Image: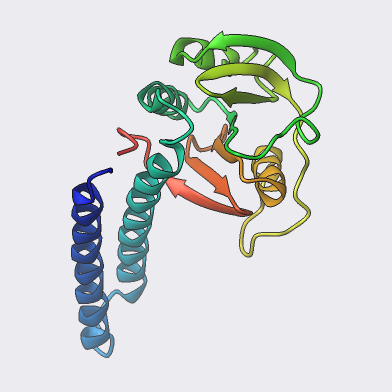
Amino acid sequence: MPSIEPHLSMTGRLKGSLLKLTEEINQMIDTIDMQESNVLNKFEQIHHSFHNVQAATASYYLKLYLSPFIAQYDVLSTAVQHLSERNHGALIVIQRKDELDSLVHSGLPLNADLSYALLESIFYTGSPLHDGAVLICNDTITSAANVLPLSEHKVEGKKLGTRHRAALGLSEQTDALVLVVSEETGRATFALDGKLYPIRTTGMV
């Protein structure tokens, strides 16, 4: 039976971070009538703090969701971190319980052991495979250059690129978890159940 201590530790940190955010919001409310108060700057600070809390929490749950389906999580984490640092766009599908054959198409079979070096070389800018999705099943890179179904749903306030729409599209129809690294910003997210969650790449918890 898995220990519940890591979960309790995470929830404790989350509560502490949310309490700190609450204090920042209350301070802004208390000073909002003051002429010298820079409300816009405070909003930006709170937004940044909230994003960091959300990303750290999502990173924790990402590992939790993947642990039953991938033993080499650290390998995946290292690859995503390196891709993010170099702004190399990536789309990585981790198969969980649902079969994906009917929705993941046109890929090049690899059937190679999962390694961060191989993942990074696949998504290296200019690689003939870098535009498609990699499929990982049971710590094996099954195929690369896969085409995924694109989501038709719009995310309020966001213009989504093809990789993010593909990640959402597959996650809307299956229980697959899809990792995305943005080529423009280097930011990493994961799609699950038709929603996108930002993650922090440093350590990925």
Q: Nearer the viewer, residue 123 or 68?
A: 68
Q: How many marks?
A: 0
User: As drawn, which residue projects farthest toward the front?
Assistant: 1
Q: Is residue 128 visible?
A: no
Q: Nearer the viewer, residue 192 or 123?
A: 192
Q: Is residue 130 left or right of residue 11?
A: right
Q: Is residue 182 visible?
A: yes
**In the image, what residue occupies the spot 34% across and 46% down?**
60
Q: Is residue 25 left or right of residue 55?
A: left
Check the image and report above or below for 192 versus 134: below
Residue 52: x %, y % from top left: 33, 53
**In the image, what residue occupies the spot 63% across and 23% down?**
134
Q: How is the image coloured?
A: rainbow
> Dividing the picture into quarters, in which one does residue 99 lie?
top right
**In the image, what residue occupies the spot 28% across and 43% down?**
1
Residue 194: x %, y % from top left: 64, 54
Residue 152: x %, y % from top left: 78, 54
User: As drawn, which residue projects farthest toward the bottom?
Assistant: 33
> Dividing the picture into quarters, in which one does residue 29 lie?
bottom left
